[in-house]
Image (cartoon, rainbow, N blue to C red):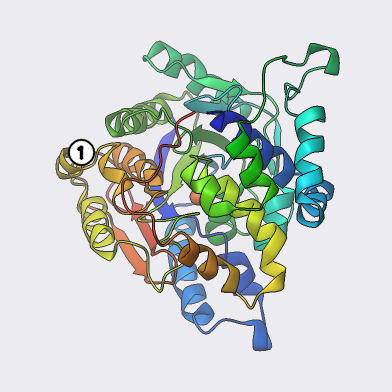
Amino acid sequence: MAELVAVIASTHHPFFYRASTSTGEDRPPFADEWVRKVEAFRETLTKARPDVLVMVGSDHFHQLWLDNMPQFLVGKAPFYDANWYNEEREFGLPRMLFEGQEDLSTYILREGIDAGFDLAFSNELRIDHSITCPIITLRPQNDLPIVPIYTNIFAPPLPRPSRFVQLGKTIRQLVESWPSDKRVAVIGTGHLSLELGGPRQFGPHGPDPEFDQKAVQWIASGDLDGCLSEVTLDSLHLPGNATHGFMDFMLMMGVAGEGKKADYVDTYDLFHTMEAYFTWYPNGGVA
Amino acid sequence: MSKYLLNKFLFTVDRDPELVERYREDPKGMVEAWESEYANRILNCHGAESSTWLRFEDAEREALAAHDYPRLFELGAHPFLTLTLFIAMFERDHEPLGFQLEYARRLGHFALPYPDIAT
Ligand SMILES: [Fe+2]
């Protein structure tokens, strides 16, 4: 069976690429420390020596649209082009191409549907910064095949937080039962408190630093019960109007497992939103 | 209310560099042209299979024609779509982050709960 060698949860900050590659006067004062933190985070994946990456993210109205909106979708294609014109325009993100791990996509779809998730699929998916950002931060050489999984955190009605957690638990079971000798890492990105297109956007910190503290605590300690007892679709409006992306962190807590403390935790307080990086090694360390 | 159509406008314009520029230069003319040419197009479908029933309400058409993004927020347009498109049009006229902060200020009178964005 395949081995789950790392579980990684992260924010996906579209400005990292530009900040980290800018020089001279264009380089923001926070860039050097940000790069240092990202490189340390990257090492936690490198050490796990993965062969395949399952990438959990959320399409930001790029390919998935309101005339046909899936709640959970698995990419099943040999290749994925990536990043969109409006992401190049706004964030300076480069065009990218990924190889797909199609047999794992097939397995996750078949077994996931049988496990009670009516997963949508796509045979031609152009992926966006929710998946390319973590590749840029964690695996910039982009040399591993992926399985992209998209969640709807964007267009109500959304699945509830508990459903994200259940899907995370299911993804873990499926990876661990995949008949393969590959080493698999599951990487998912979401948001802490975040406001987009509202009065609290682009402040000196995330819109709700108190929520962020609590959220980091829940994730770092694997406190799914505490998190699920406080977080609802309604409550997520309070920390910022785009905070429903936190449910992707909850999904990753489901992958990591109830009560599982993260082996690596780091945060970086930036304008607009806080960065947060977590890594779990399911088998208690890196073999 | 046709929040869906508002979002469809923002979505289809934002992903097309030419439409972004047309909307910046001539909002009123462009919104009228969009409503007659694009509003009923089902994305992915042949033109002969367009819908027949989609049209803006007056308040929506006026808000779009006036580049009135606080009003779009009030009408329940998806804030991410509005923000992205307006950054594309107007960030260039400001210092770095200047437009984003002005945008926040102009929405400053909204308190929770924000207008419902469900479509
Ligand atoms: Fe995002």
Residue shown at 47%/38% (left/top)?
Answer: A154
Residue at the limit of the structure toward the bottom, as seen here: A25
Residue A88, above or below A19: above
Residue B58 picture quarter: top right
Letter of the chain that mark 1 sits on in the rendering: A
Q: Tell whether A177 sits left or right of B80.
A: left
Q: Quadrant of residue A268?
A: bottom left
Q: Position of residue A143 (x, y in %)?
A: 65, 50
Q: Position of residue A235 (x, y in %)?
A: 25, 43
Residue B115, percent from left and from top: 40, 42
> Which residue: 68% across, 24% down?
A123
Q: Is residue A131 visible?
A: no
Amino acid residing under circle 1: Leu
Q: How many numbered marks, from 0 up?
A: 1
Is disc 1 placed on a helix, strand or loop?
A: helix
| Residue B82 image offset from top left, x and y in percent | 59, 49
On the question of residue A197 being in view, the answer is yes
**Left of B37 or right of it: where is A47?**
left
Give the camera-side residue of B85 and A114: B85
Report the side of A166 relative to A202 (left or right).
Answer: left
> Which quadrant of the figure contains the N terminus of chain A?
top left
**Residue drawn where x is 67% and y is 32% of the image:** A125
Which residue is painted at 54% across and 27% down in the image?
A74
From the viewer's side, name the closer residue of B19 and A68.
B19
Q: Which residue is mark 1?
A: A228
The verdict on label 1 being within 8 Å of ligand 1 is no
Q: Which is nearer the eye, A208 or A172?
A: A208
Please rate how many residues cluster around mark 1, counting C-alpha atoms within 10 Å: few if below 14, some from 14 to 19, many from 20. Answer: some
Quarter of the view holding residue B41: top right
